[in-house]
Amino acid sequence: MLSRILKRSLPIALLLTLVSVSLAFAQEQEPITAEYAYYAIDNVVLFIAAVLVLFMQAGFAMVEAGFNSAKNTINILFKNFMDMSVGVLLYFIIGYSIMYGADVTGAGLFGWGGFGIGSADVTAANAGPGVLNPQVDWLFQVAFAATAATIVSGAVAGRMQFRAYLIYSVIITAIIYPISGFWVWGGGWLSALGFHDFAGSLLVHAVGGFAGLAGAIVLGPRIGRFNKDGSANPMPGHSLSLAALGVFILWIGWYGFNPGSQLAFAGTANTNATMLIAVNTTLAAAAGAVLAMMLSWFMFKKPDLGMTLNGALAGLVAITANCDAVTNNSAIIIGAVGGILVVAATMLLEKMQVDDAVGAWPVHGVAGIWGGIAAGIFGGYPLGVQVLGSLIIPVWAFVTLLGVFYALKVAGILRVSMTEEIEGLDLVEHGTVNYPEFGASVVNAQPVDTSALPARG
């Protein structure tokens, strides 16, 4: 009898305990006002968006590993992981301050706000719609900085020394990206002109794409990529499965990248804007994939999965600058043009004998420029200003990092030796291989013409 009574009364006792504890906490908490609710919704949603963008690093790692040789897989994964790790520390120490600090030049060139995040927490007195907690704002922004850095990894895959890559990663995260970021998002000179780059077609993607182009030019092509007569040898990646998985991850992550850049989400207007951004992002990606597939099918007589995957990414990059300002129909056009451009730019690189192993420049550089210009054509922003900003930002990244890569080459630490490149960077740089059960790495079956190779360094 007693045990039966205890069994029946235990749930009631637990419920009463939970209610009493909840009431006690409720008395200590600040009252839930409309301002408090807006602040909470905006910041929690931004945190979720930041996590999605951070997870895009996994997508980049899969795409780059899949599009490259199996013998360089660990090296690629390592570079992506260190872009994230190095980027977090450097962007915390100085990058965020340069990008969002007060203008110290008087000309809108770069800012400074002290080391670290450097802002006080939001209190109940000033919480409200559109007010961001500085901690979550930094978390969202550092995800963008890491994205700009990691775009380069695939373009220089298979031939760049790991220590040289780390030096590059430090420079782009701490200096190159924050300075151009200040020009637009930090209230700098391009912002004053009215330039619009909503979520970073230029500031993130074109910066990374043109940094990759600079690296690929200074490094020279992989062994066997081009013959003495200028013709190109195909060097297919070891796993299109990984590449496709990576693109799916990136596509999902873009829903943090673009809708997250709305920064305020509570209320009818913000909700409507966020949903428009999400749908425009989806339409542009699909259009880019379809047009890249159709064009590659027409040109190569077979549908090309790699080109189609890059077409989807190009559509995503192109819509990133203008997704808040264009209609659904315009988003389809913008993405479709991005898909066409990625095929054309990939063929142009082959003609120029520039070896971009994953198509970083066509996807992020060329489509990024198109996205900025499209904000003027379809989004109502001043076209002349959009063209100016869409050119000056990638030129800044290309010229500065061309100098960085050339300095590393002069120092003799940029490129691995021919023997090391043939053996594979996994074994040479890291002492292990990603697929040990498959045995030693092998070189592509095509004959290797070494007469067109650049000097090592």
Image (tube, rainbow, N blue to C red):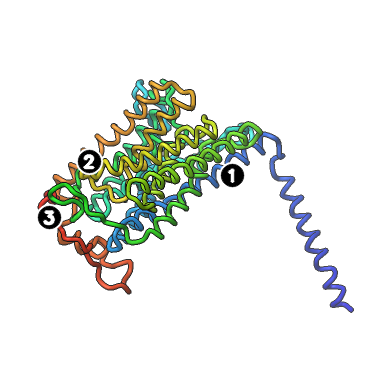
N-term mark: 1 or 3 = 1
Question: What amino acid type should be assigned to the residue bearing mark 3?
Answer: Thr
Q: CA distance from mark 1 to mark 3?
A: 55 Å
Where residue 400 sits, quadrant-wise, is: top left
**Secondary structure under badge 3?**
loop
Q: Position of residue 162 (x, y in %)?
A: 25, 54
Amino acid type of the residue tagged 1 in the rendering: Val
Residue 44 has which mark?
A: 1
Quick one: 186 or 195, which is closer to the camera? Answer: 195
Counting every numbered tag in the picture gives 3
Residue drawn at x 39%, y 22% is 385
Q: Describe residue 146's horizontal placement relative to residue 33 as left or right.
A: left
Q: Is residue 40 above or below residue 301?
A: above
Residue name at image x 34 percent, y 43 percent: 343
In this image, 110 relative to 289: left or right? left
Q: Nearer the viewer, residue 431 or 225?
A: 225
Q: Secondary structure at mark 1?
A: helix
Dot 2 or dot 1, earlier in sequence: 1
Badge 2 vs badge 3, beta-carbon distance below 8 Å: no
Q: Nearer the viewer, residue 181 or 33?
A: 181
Q: Which mark is residue 450?
A: 3
Within 10 angstroms of label 2, few (less than 14), some, or many (20 or more) residues? some
Q: Position of residue 148 (x, y in %)?
A: 37, 42
**Residue 127 visible in image:** no
Q: Are marks 2 and 1 in contact (CB under 8 Å)?
A: no
Q: Which residue is the site of mark 2?
A: 404
Q: Nearer the viewer, residue 109 or 313?
A: 313
Question: How far is mark 2 from mark 1, CA to CA?
Answer: 39 Å
